Image (tube, grey):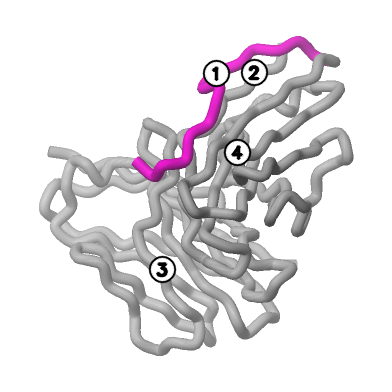
Amino acid sequence: AQTVTQSQPEMSVQEAETVTLSCTYDTSENNYYLFWYKQPPSRQMILVIRQEAYKQQNATENRFSVNFQKAAKSFSLKISDSQLGDTAMYFCAFMILGSSNTGKLIFGQGTTLQVKP
Amino acid sequence: ETGVTQSPTHLIKTRGQQVTLRCSSQSGHNTVSWYQQALGQGPQFIFQYYREEENGRGNFPPRFSGLQFPNYSSELNVNALELDDSALYLCASTPDRLNTEAFFGQGTRLTVV
């Protein structure tokens, strides 16, 4: 079975501080992508960061970075210099590559992050 | 804004009825996927359409069906609505079926009473 587990239902952080959201996944495939999506109250799912499983270097996007541990099947998201606008639900997801699977995102249960002023 | 639009934004239906949800994909995108997101949960993949044909399906019963039109817009149809069908339905489009960069719409909130 292919699953994604986010063990932290809720987290909070003070503005300007750093927070790390955890994610583990399970798959027997080798060729896949990992994602973090943000879903604010507006409901629209927004891509935060993406990591190709074959790349050892961790992806970064401005204040967002990941710690990808392929052997441990772990994919955590670090948000630096947290801003009030980062308040949202965050979903970890992966996608197996292959014509029958590409496009099928498998999501975790989500972590609600609140950034406090 | 992603360029993916869904309609309607909210909908209330009675158990047993049928519903059609609509999605206009981003310009140039020929692949559309649909997801069901129950309250407080992560989205679950329903199915994907590529060039007007179903190209993969999740663990949903046949009463969930879809269409994709020549302009690549899409519909999700649900027959014989059940209370558990109450959820946020998300549409995502990608430039093609092998592309991993999905752009999501704002979703349709369906309530079945």
Q: Secondary structure at mark 2?
A: strand
Q: Secondary structure at mark 1?
A: strand
Chain ID, mark 3: A
Query: Which residue is the site of mark 3?
Result: A50
Frontmost of labels 4 and 3 is: 3
- Quarter of the picture holding the C terminus of chain B: top right
Tell me the quarter of the picture where residue B40 sits.
Answer: top right
Tell me the quarter of the picture where residue B72 sits.
Answer: top right
Coordinates of residue B61 in the picture (x, y in percent): 86, 41
Q: Secondary structure at mark 3?
A: strand
Tell me the quarter of the picture where residue B66 sits.
Answer: top right
Query: Which residue is the site of mark 1?
Result: B10
Which residue sits at x=60%, y=69%? Answer: B98
Which residue sits at x=61%, y=61%? Answer: A103
Query: Which residue is the site of mark 4?
Result: B37
The alpha-carbon separation of the residues under discs 2 and 4 comes to 12 Å
The alpha-carbon separation of the residues under discs 4 and 3 comes to 21 Å
Q: A117 left or right of B77?
A: left
Chain ID, mark 1: B
The alpha-carbon separation of the residues under discs 1 and 3 comes to 30 Å
Q: A2 left or right of B106?
A: right
**Badges 1 and 3: C-beta atoms under 8 Å apart?**
no
Query: Which residue is the site of mark 2?
Result: B111
Q: Is residue B55 one of those drawn in magenta?
A: no
**Badges 2 and 4: C-beta atoms under 8 Å apart?**
no
- B83 to A22, vertically: above or below: above
Which amino acid lies under the numbered mark 2 shown in the image of this protein? Thr
